[in-house]
Image (tube, rainbow, N blue to C red):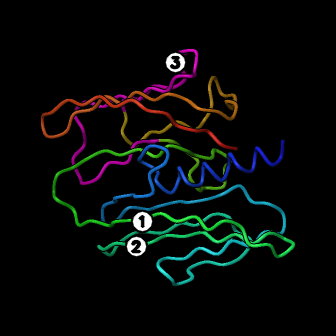
């Protein structure tokens, strides 16, 4: 069971590295100024080495890594894990392309979050580029049975993983995002994974 759980969490790391894309993609395009938060479920005694290109940017027991992508370019983000007994794990990589703003605002979403009150990725909310506040905005979160768990018309509000003030279980939830930018109405649906 523990082995299956670990493989699932490693898969979620890969999904997280490509946070606004579907499973299996290893490319992430972000605007200048985007804060990326990446993580794996930590195993006791493991050491995590995070690299950008070939430069080590974080090394130690912390399985979380956060960076503000503020210089345009293409980067390779990689994670090298070593177990407590010194065995190297699989190297995971993701190509990150940091783009200058085109001036055209857009909304993107992550596909996993960890509402555990550590101030890292505790809330699921769409990320809006630019300064335009959408005149139409509605975020809805549903469970797999179609029950509405969360709804907001505020682009700054996000779902904290609760329903009726109680924590929701670990799992996959469905979001529906309706918004307008530059006079165009958009509707996006997708999945978000709640991890504790």
In the image, farthest residue toward the right: 85
Contact between labelled residues 2 and 1, with CB atoms less than 8 Å apart:
yes
**What's the residue at 31%, 74% (across, down)?**
73
Location of mark 2 (residue): 75
Q: Answer with left or right where residue 98 lies relative to residue 24.
A: left
Judging depth in this view, the residue of 136 and 20 nearest the camera is: 20
Can you give x and y, in whole percent of width and height, for residue 86 in the image? 82, 76
Location of mark 1 (residue): 95
Can you give x and y, in whole percent of width and height, for residue 1 in the image? 84, 41
Whether residue 70 is situated above or below residue 131 in the rendered picture: below
Query: Which image quadrant is residue 68 in?
Result: bottom left
Q: Answer with left or right where residue 174 lies relative to residue 108.
A: right
Q: Secondary structure at mark 1?
A: strand
Q: Nearer the viewer, mark 1 or mark 3?
A: 1
- Estimate how packed mark 1 is, as few (under 14), some (14 to 19) or many (20 or more) residues with alpha carbons within 10 Å: some
- Estimate how packed mark 2 is, as few (under 14), some (14 to 19) or many (20 or more) residues with alpha carbons within 10 Å: some
């Amino acid at each position: 069971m523990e082995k299956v759980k670990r493989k699932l969490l490693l898969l979620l790391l890969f999904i997280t590295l490509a946070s606004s894309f579907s499973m299996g993609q290893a490319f992430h395009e972000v605007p200048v100024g985007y804060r990326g938060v990446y993580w794996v479920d930590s195993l006791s005694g493991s050491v995590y080495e995070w690299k950008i290109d070939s430069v080590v940017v974080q090394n130690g027991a912390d399985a979380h890594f956060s960076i503000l992508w503020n210089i345009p370019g293409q980067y390779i983000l990689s994670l090298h894990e070593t177990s407590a007994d010194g065995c190297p794990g699989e190297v995971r990589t993701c190509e990150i392309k940091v783009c200058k703003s085109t001036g055209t605002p857009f909304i993107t979403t992550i596909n996993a979050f960890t509402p555990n009150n550590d101030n890292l990725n505790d809330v699921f909310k769409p990320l809006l580029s630019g300064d335009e506040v959408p005149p139409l905005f509605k975020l809805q979160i549903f469970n797999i049975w179609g029950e509405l768990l969360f709804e907001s018309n505020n682009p700054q509000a996000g779902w904290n993983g609760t329903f009726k003030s109680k924590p929701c279980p670990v799992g996959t939830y469905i979001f529906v995002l309706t918004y307008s930018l530059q006079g165009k109405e958009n509707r996006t649906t997708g999945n978000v994974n709640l991890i504790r």
